Amino acid sequence: MKTTDFAGESAPGTLHAPFRFTRVRRPAKELNLMRILVIEDDPDLLRAVARALREGGYAVDEAADGPEGLFKAKGADYDAIVLDIMLPRMDGWEVLSRLRLEKKTPVLILSARGTVPDRVRGLDSGADDYLVKPFDLVELLSRLRALIRRAAGAADSLIRMNDITIDIRSRTVESSGQRINLTAREYSLIEFLAIHRGTLVTRTMLYEHLFDENDDTLSNLVDVYIASIRRKLGKDLITTRRGQGYIIDV
């Protein structure tokens, strides 16, 4: 399985948005789906960041102001939130403050306010990272991957389970040293279960983390993906607890 990402070089120009990127489209089967919420009031920037994240392998929800962002952030279990500070109706500071009363979702502040006091305020207010505009999309993706790993207690990008190795950074899976080809959501599902191995993962949790708000959560897609993963990695890797969910005990 080849893996590609946004190239490290910055392309000239900004497309009228405060970021720089060179885009390399990755085949769909290479994607790594985790669910991200982007709260940004600039429609061009919101659209561009959301598109880049989707092409980088994430399920993405969008919000254009503070109240909408807070409502979505509190209503779903996102793997990470990208939060602008200068938002209409409720600024990012207030969104972060109210969110932290209920949830520990990793938050990356994305703001043109890059002074030391602003960065210190953001981190002291409960943000997990702070990225100043203009920025490179490759750096945004890297920081989000790091936030998600740390939040799950998986600081190392390699997860080893007997003869199976998952490389979160390259988004690859090997079994007994052989590369296993997985679809986007097959990879996402096995990565999520592996990061939370030893813990029961409900079907609701899987739908909340692997699908965005436009997907049909009443389908049997999870069952289909579980069956396919078992065919490729072994039927005993994932244990089904009937009526409860799934768990990896390795």
Image: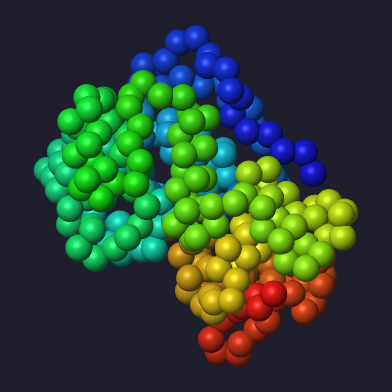
| Residue 41, visible in the rendered structure | no
Image-based side of 206 in relation to 157, left or right: left
**x and y percentages locating residue 116 in the rendered image:** 22, 27
| Residue 138, visible in the rendered structure | yes
> Hey, which residue is sitting farthest top in the picture?
12
Rendered residue at 78%/62% (across/down): 164
Q: Which of 151 and 37 lies nearest the eye of the viewer? A: 151
For the N terminus, the image quarter is top right
From what the image shows, is residue 103 above or below residue 133? Answer: below
Q: Which of 12 and 211 lies nearest the eye of the viewer? A: 12
**x and y percentages locating residue 107 in the rendered image:** 34, 48
Rendered residue at 63%/65% (across/down): 194
From what the image shows, is residue 137 above or below residue 97? Answer: above
> Hey, which residue is sitting farthest bottom in the picture?
242
From what the image shows, is residue 10 above or below residue 248? Answer: above
Q: How is the image coloured?
A: rainbow
Rendered residue at 22%/36% (across/down): 120
